[in-house]
Image: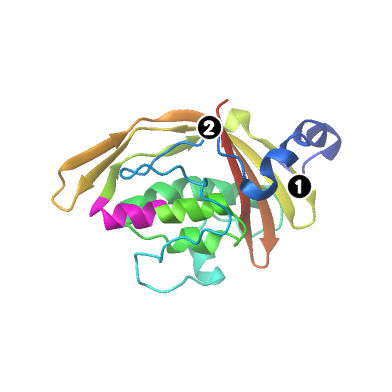
């Protein structure tokens, strides 16, 4: 899309600041955890996510960038968009593989919503389940946002989440959660060499 024209984008996007600050919103969050029910990002302040189930050690930023789309490491608005696209792909993958390392590497400590996603993976693992079918698809026609300043971006995507189908170790379906459409407001900060997720707000369109 090229560099953002702040005069056009910023006026409409300034209303997002309150929503994004601190990831504190709980309304409209799509629940994807099979059991018990958990709303991603709704944990109380100070809550620490459970340990990563993968046991494979933390990913370095360099290892994370290898997994991400080309250009995701650029300190541009386009790079921030690529990072959000990676997040949308990575969350279902983490539930399928029961491996939250990339989600953790992608997230800054202050992002409580991100901690909720990691905890979803931990709970799926603890229940002996994994995601068998499910995806999160962005609507590029609704893409919005702006590069607020050097190293600070905001991205808005309408997203369609399909039904999530969970199976046990034998491949037997145990639970399905209904899909939904929502708006995803993401705040990112560039921490060399990669964009990191600083906050997420998910609301009904």
Q: Position of residue 117 (x, y in %)?
A: 46, 51
Residue at (42, 62) in percent of width and height: 50
Left or right: where 80 falls relative to 43: right
The quarter in which the N terminus is drawn is: top right
Q: Residues within 10 Å of mark 2 (few under 14, many from 20)?
A: some
Q: Position of residue 203 (x, y in %)?
A: 57, 32
**Mark 2 residue element:** loop
Q: Residues within 10 Å of mark 1 (few under 14, many from 20)?
A: many
Residue 140 to residue 130: above or below: above
**Marks 2 & 1, CB-CB < 8 Å contact:** no
Left or right: where 187 falls relative to 100: right
Q: How is the image coloured?
A: rainbow
Residue at (37, 54) in percent of width and height: 121
Q: Which residues are magenta?
A: 120-129
Magenta part, dominant SS: helix
Left or right: where 185 falls relative to 96: right
Q: Which residue is mark 1?
A: 147
Q: In front of the other: label 2 or label 1?
A: 2
Residue 128 to residue 193: above or below: above
Q: Which residue is mark 2?
A: 28
Q: Position of residue 102 (x, y in %)?
A: 46, 61
Q: Pick whichever, 30 or 149, lies toward us.
A: 30
Residue 6 to residue 114: above or below: above
Write down the quadrant of residue 135 in the picture.
Answer: top left
């Amino acid at each position: 899309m090229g560099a953002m024209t702040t005069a056009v984008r910023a006026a409409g996007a300034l209303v997002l600041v309150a929503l994004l600050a601190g990831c504190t919103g709980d309304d409209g969050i799509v629940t994807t955890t099979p059991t018990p029910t958990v709303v991603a990002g709704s944990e109380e302040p100070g809550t620490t996510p459970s340990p990563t189930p993968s046991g494979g050690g933390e990913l370095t930023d360099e290892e994370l960038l290898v997994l991400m789309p080309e250009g995701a490491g650029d300190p541009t608005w386009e790079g921030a968009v690529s990072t959000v696209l990676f997040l949308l792909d990575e969350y279902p993958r983490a539930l399928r593989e029961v491996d939250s390392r990339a989600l953790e590497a992608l997230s800054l400590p202050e992002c409580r919503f991100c901690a909720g996603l990691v905890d979803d993976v931990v709970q799926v693992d603890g229940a002996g389940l994994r995601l068998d079918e499910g995806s999160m698809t962005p609507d590029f026609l609704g893409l919005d946002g702006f590069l607020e300043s050097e190293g600070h971006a905001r991205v808005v995507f309408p997203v369609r989440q399909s039904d999530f189908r969970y199976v046990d170790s034998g491949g037997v379906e145990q639970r399905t959660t209904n899909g939904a459409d929502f708006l995803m407001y993401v705040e990112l900060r560039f921490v060399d060499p990669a964009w990191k997720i600083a906050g997420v707000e998910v609301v009904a369109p």
